[in-house]
Image: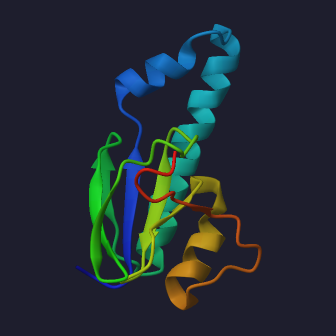
Amino acid sequence: MVDPAVFYVEATESEIDAARQGVSEEDFEVIADDMMFYRSSAIERLEAWDIPVSRIAGRRPLQFTVNGTPETTDFSDVTWLDFIVVYRRNERPRAFAPNDIEAVRAYWESGSTATDTAEPVAPPGSF
């Protein structure tokens, strides 16, 4: 695995349909349009910066090594439909909104962000 590793987690059709509940069709069209714009912009910028990214369709548990111990993270605490995960060896993975791509780059490069807007992913059993 590349260190640090970057994963772009894309919402599945069923996740998007679930988000549609309780939202007007007009509002949902705006939300979906924004999501697709930020998705394509984020992927384009990651590629332009030569940051290797693995794309994953749908939330699923992923295993990371944190302080020498394997931990499975399911990202259930992340509220964005799409999100970007940056994993630095032996640290908890951090999730970023796709529209916060500059923070992704800063964290990927140095391990910190200017505004540190990432959501640290909670360890198992702490929900």
Position of residue 109 measured from the top left corner of the image (x, y, whole percent): 53, 88
Position of residue 126 measured from the top left corner of the image (x, y, whole percent): 50, 51
Farthest left residue in view: 1
- Left of 113 or right of it: where is 123? left
Q: Nearer the viewer, residue 31 or 122?
A: 122
Q: Picture quarter containing residue 72?
A: bottom left
Position of residue 115 measured from the top left corner of the image (x, y, whole percent): 77, 73
The tally of labels here is: 0
Position of residue 41 measured from the top left corner of the image (x, y, whole percent): 54, 56
The way the protein has been coloured in the rendering is: rainbow
At 65% from the left and 61% from the top, the residue drawn is 100
Farthest right residue in view: 115
**With respect to residue 7, does 38 lie above or below?**
above
Q: Nearer the viewer, residue 116 or 67?
A: 67
Q: Quadrant of the N terminus?
A: bottom left
**With respect to residue 90, does 70 lie above or below?**
above
At 54% from the left and 46% from the top, the residue drawn is 78
At 29% from the left and 49% from the top, the residue drawn is 61
Farthest bottom residue in view: 110
- Left of 82 or right of it: where is 26? right
- Left of 80 or right of it: where is 115? right
- Left of 111 or right of it: where is 87? left
